[in-house]
Image (cartoon, grey):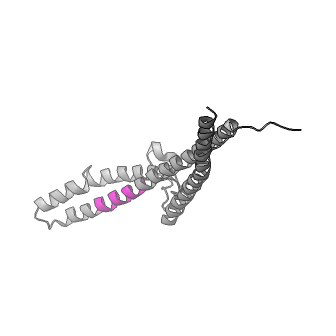
Amino acid sequence: MDGSRRWAGTLLGTVGVALVVAGPVMVLRGRSGRKEIRTELAAQKITFPARGLPAELAAYAGRRVETGPEAHAYAEFIKGNLAHATGGRTYAEITAELHAAGGDDEKLSELRQTAFMGQSLRASLMSAYQAWHITTLVTGLGAALTGLGAALVATSDALAPRSPDHS
């Protein structure tokens, strides 16, 4: 019984130490990822218009896009503008119309370019938003693993055989 207890304690301690090391690495990677997203978004210098936003985006008026949630909000702003500009049609639908028209309709060509640029920017902003969520997940998991690792190390210590105190 004493051997299995010692083995369990060693195993718990080893796994605990590994988690105590891995957890902070994940926290740091999550934080650095978040910082990189902020830096990249700020470098784009995207700013919400000061007025004329839909009611659900009014809180963003005049603000720069520097966070994942702001990137998502701006992507929604683009979605609305794009739907208005293209009559709700996608790049693929406009391309099909252009091909059906023989490929040399200047108005459809310009509209297709508008749809392409808008959908590309929207996709980039949505990617930043998703990355923002991933950094949150990585940071949270890192913190949880650190706590779990510390608990396992403490449990391992509690299972360790004690020598009698000869005071």
| Residue 20 located within the stretch drawn in magenta | no
What secondary structure do most residues of the magenta stretch adopt?
helix
Total count of labels = 0
**Depth order, front residue of 101/19:** 19
| Residue 121 located within the stretch drawn in magenta | yes
Q: Could you say where residue 105 lies in the image, as x and y percent from the top left? A: 16, 65
Q: Is residue 15 left or right of residue 114?
A: right
Q: Quadrant of the N terminus?
A: top right
Which quadrant of the structure image shows residue 121? bottom left
Q: Is residue 135 left or right of residue 118?
A: right
Which residue is found at the position 61% from the left and 43% from the top? 10
Which residue is found at the position 45% from the left and 55% from the top? 128
**Depth order, front residue of 91/67:** 67
Which quadrant of the structure image shows residue 148? top right
Q: Could you say where residue 50 lies in the image, as x and y percent from the top left? A: 51, 54
Which residue is found at the position 20% from the left and 54% from the top? 93
- Note whether residue 7 is visible: yes
**Depth order, front residue of 34/97:** 34
Q: Could you say where residue 5 lies in the image, as x and y percent from the top left? A: 62, 35
The residues colored magenta run 114-125
- Note whether residue 52 is visible: no
Q: Could you say where residue 167 lies in the image, as x and y percent from the top left? A: 89, 38
